[in-house]
Amino acid sequence: MSKTFIGNVKSVLSGDTLILTSPNNPSAERTFALAYVNAPHLKREGDEPFAFESREHLRNLVVGKPVQCTVAYTIPSSGREFGTAKLQDGTEFPDEQVKAGWLKVREDAGRKEEDEEVLDKLEKLRGLESQAKSEGKGVWSGAGGIIEVQNDLGGPEFLTQWKGKTVDGVVERVLSGDRLLVRLLLSDKKHVQPLTLLAGIRTPATERVLPSTGATQPAEEYGNEAKAFVESRLLQRKIKVEIVGASPQGQLVANIIHPRGNIAEFLLQEGLARCNDFHSTMLGEKMAALRAAEKQAQTKKLRLHRHHVAKAETGNQDMIVYKIIGGDTILVRNKAGTNEKRISFSSIRGPRTNEASEAPFREESKEFLRKKVIGKHVKISIDGTKPASEGFEAKEVATVTEKGTNIGLALVEAGWASVIRHRKDDTDRAPNYDELLAAQEKAKEEGKGMWSGKPQKAKQYLDLSENTQKAKIMLATLQRQKRVPAIVDFCKAGSRFTLLIPRENAKLTLVLGGIRAPRAPRADGEGGEPFGKEALELANRRCNQRDVEVDIHDMDKVGGFIGSLYINRENFAKVLVEEGLASVHAYSAEKSGNSAELFSAEKKAKEARSGLWHSWDPSQDEEEEPEAVEEETTADSSVSLEKKPTDYRDVIVTNVDGNGKLKIQEIGKGTAALETLMSEFRKFNLDPKNKQPLKDAPKTGEYVSAKFSADGEWYRARVRANDRTAKKAEVLYIDYGNSEMIPWANLRPLDQPQFSVQKLKAQAVDASLSFVQLPTGADYFQDAVGFIAEVTEGKRLVGSFDFVDTKENLNYITLYDPKTNNELPGLNDSLNKEIVANGYGMVPKKLKAWERSKAFESYLKHLTEVESLAKQDRLGMWEYGDITED
């Protein structure tokens, strides 16, 4: 009795053979051949005539449908079953195939058969065959039926002809969820059957045998499920194939369009695939639909995305670009300046140092970005955070836009950045990732930026700080020009910058003229003066890496250029002064021509009690006015005086330095105010509640209260240096000029406004004896210092201020000791003369310009005569003869 069963047709191998699956267990397959007939077969080495048409006729009728199969016989050696099949609509096979002329009845069929039912069946089939033959149907149509089948793409000519076109196809095999064997029906006579990748997606791998070892590699999670999903919908179905490109391995990349849509989208929606970034540029705008489908599965946490964590919406943050770190990284701050972030552009990177083809373009990439965004208001949308790893700091990646322009995209379009290939599970990427990839491909095609392969010769800037001679030549060139375009390369302090002058290919140090800004701390935070850090921060915030204009006025002794810097047509020196982060230097302000503007700015800062002037006392200006007038009337070392100055002031010498320089106090309002301040200062420090020591180690340049070792009293001081091992600091007593090394325990904070240097400036000023050079020999030098101390200590003297060097901040003075009746001694009876007369000093051989002035001619002649007498008498340094003769 014949065996009957129901099976679903999974595929059709040829016009006479079916692959069936069990309705209850789709993974259980069996091969079923139609009995008594032969069909032309499809073969890899070449199809038999009419093989494809024969197979297609049967495939169109049965694939995907249930059939009732009746087994007529089984071949014992192979176990293959042969029989007949019937569709639910009553269509019978092989009858239908024979009738259509696509099958031939085997000649030997029924020779040994005795069953009447079988013989009747064969007679019917032969009758149908005769009818088809007489009508010239199917294989009986005569010549033809041969189709050329190519099993690969063959070469670039295929894509040249077919890329971007849609052709009909049949899915012959499903290797995995994203890899199919597709027969492309290019024409009636030509088919191509390449391995085809689903464009834009990647599914987990299925189980496979490794050719190298023969071992079986298990399927990845959801790999078999993805394959089954595609098989059930596409295997041996007629489809549309949109050809988009080829993989580097020569595999076809295409959109496979099911009657209900793109199969790739359905896989993504079910969480059985991820988007494949490598296909993005091939798909262009069509990639957006795939991204949306993937996002839908991520939201539902389906299968591959079951552990997906949605990114928190950060929104757009308004920031200002503060610094360009490199071609893909910037520093930004909020408008208040309280929050600073290091931002890397999402999904892109600038030219890499370790890539020989990219490294030459690093500076050009950075300059492109600088011109685009430095100092501008941008919107930052955080796309993710990269945790710190070995050798790399943690960083935030973000999309940066300026007035609607995506800056990352602009970098890629110009060829100054490349797009990062993310890991499949990396969600910290730019939302316009596919647009970035497309822009990169276009930049490569057009040979833009670093894709040109021809880096421009790096711009070489001559560093004028290393070549004084060339600096002097450049000074003359720059002085003739007005508002020279420049770029601020580095801010050293609030008023000191490193500039690049592209027009002259020069690099120079610029010091702002007309002002004095407090010294900035070192990189480790040590050193510096009060408000030096704030001044530097303002300079960085407003000027660093900006395009500016400069006017050059002069050059200092160490090769620095003195001038004005304009940012957005505003004098930055004025900005510093207005913020209270610099004071006006009267003489150089007059010389620069900006004095009115700067003094007006300083007045505003004082009235607002800003920065340096937070404890400003208006009465202080009354004391400083004579000094300001003096600075205006004095000149630098190149000035010659026609008339001897008559600026006499009562002074006290408070200290003689180890280098022979004097520290003096001017007797007057300043010393009276100092006495009052010191009285209050002592009371303050005697109060037990004010005995708090410094919280941290003292910093160089910091103002402190210091306990003088000689009398145990507290004085205002400034830290000169630190010995961290011994926990001692060298301090300078700012009102007296002497210094010493004392333990940190003897230091207290000087942060009380009533005792600050803004309330009362430091009273000890630097001075040097006019026309006197002290001995260079150590013993004679110490004798000279001792003699000066002896003739000045504790005495109220009169100082003739012969010259004020504003650059060195040094007063050249001639000292007189008044007689008991308070009358001045004669002009030639000075302490300077006494020092020379006793052999403790000599008249300098090389005189400064002001010392050679006509006004001092007679006095200088007198001193020279006094020196000659000391030599004759072998006094002091001359005891062994004239040491200047050689």
Image: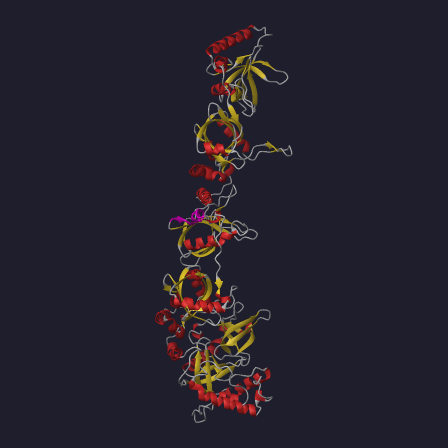
Residue 191 pos. (x, y %) = 49, 26
Residue 690 pos. (x, y %) = 49, 73
123 to 53, vertically: above or below: above
637 to 347, vertically: above or below: below
Name the one closer to the observer, 139 or 350: 139
Does any portion of residue 336 appear in the rendered image? yes
The answer to which image quadrant residue 822 occupies is bottom left
In screen coordinates, is 282 left or right of 722? left
Does any portion of residue 342 appear in the rendered image? no
Name the one closer to the observer, 73 or 633: 633
Residue 354 pos. (x, y %) = 55, 51
Q: Residue at x 55, y 71 (%)?
A: 722
The answer to which image quadrant residue 500 occupies is bottom left
Where, quadrant-wise, is the N terminus in this rendering?
top right
Would residue 642 be counted in the magenta stretch?
no
In screen coordinates, is 11 left or right of 209? left
* Most common secondary structure along the magenta stretch: helix
Name the one closer to the observer, 400 or 196: 196
Where, quadrant-wise, is the C terminus in this rendering?
bottom right
Q: Residue at x 38, y 65 (%)?
A: 482
Name the one closer to the observer, 487 or 736: 487
Q: Residue at x 60, y 33 (%)?
A: 218
First to last magenta residue range: 404-414
User: How many labels were placed on the picture?
Assistant: 0
